[in-house]
Image: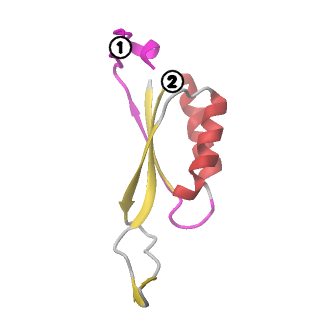
């Protein structure tokens, strides 16, 4: 099994979610994060005052899939998340040693 973590543009979440759902991914976690990379935050206005925030809002996806689905999920994120601009994000892939479903004690891929 593989755990795929992706930091993506929030605006691309719906396209990525639709793509991985078509592959048969039944569960994923996502949450809003803040970070800073090569892309710097744009100046914004608040009550007529211009300021530059110290972070850029992004969405982080966490998806655990059987090994045979990992490449497809990665390709979905790459193709649907790409705008060609700095700040499109990153993907990290980890091996998952074991998984357990708490409700009925399923283990391994059956727990997904």
Q: Secondary structure at mark 2?
A: helix
Residue in the foreground of this view, choosing between 56 and 95: 56
Residue in the foreground of this view, choosing between 7 and 31: 31
66 is higher (above) or lower (below) than 86:
above
Q: Which residue is mark 2?
A: 67
Task: Report the span colored magenta.
Answer: 83-112
Relative to 108, 18 lies left or right: right
Q: Position of residue 37 (x, y in %)?
A: 40, 66
User: Which residue appears at 64% of the width and 29% of the height?
Assistant: 23
Relative to 25, 4 lies left or right: left
Quadrant for the N terminus, please: top left
Q: Which residue is mark 1?
A: 103
Q: Earlier in the sequence, mark 1 or mark 2?
A: 2
Circle nearer the viewer, 1 or 2: 1
Q: Quadrant of residue 47?
A: bottom left
User: Which residue appears at 37% of the width and 76% of the height?
Assistant: 53
């Amino acid at each position: 099994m593989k755990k795929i973590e992706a930091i993506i543009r929030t605006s691309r979440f719906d396209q990525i979610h639709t793509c991985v759902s078509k592959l048969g991914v039944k569960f994923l976690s996502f949450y809003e994060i803040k970070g800073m990379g090569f892309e710097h935050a744009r100046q914004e206005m608040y009550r007529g005052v211009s300021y530059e925030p110290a972070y850029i809002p992004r969405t982080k996806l966490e998806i655990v899939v059987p090994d045979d689905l990992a490449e497809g999920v990665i390709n979905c994120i790459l193709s649907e998340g790409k705008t060609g601009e700095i700040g499109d994000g990153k993907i990290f892939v980890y091996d998952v040693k074991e998984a357990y479903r708490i409700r009925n004690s399923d283990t391994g891929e059956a727990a997904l």
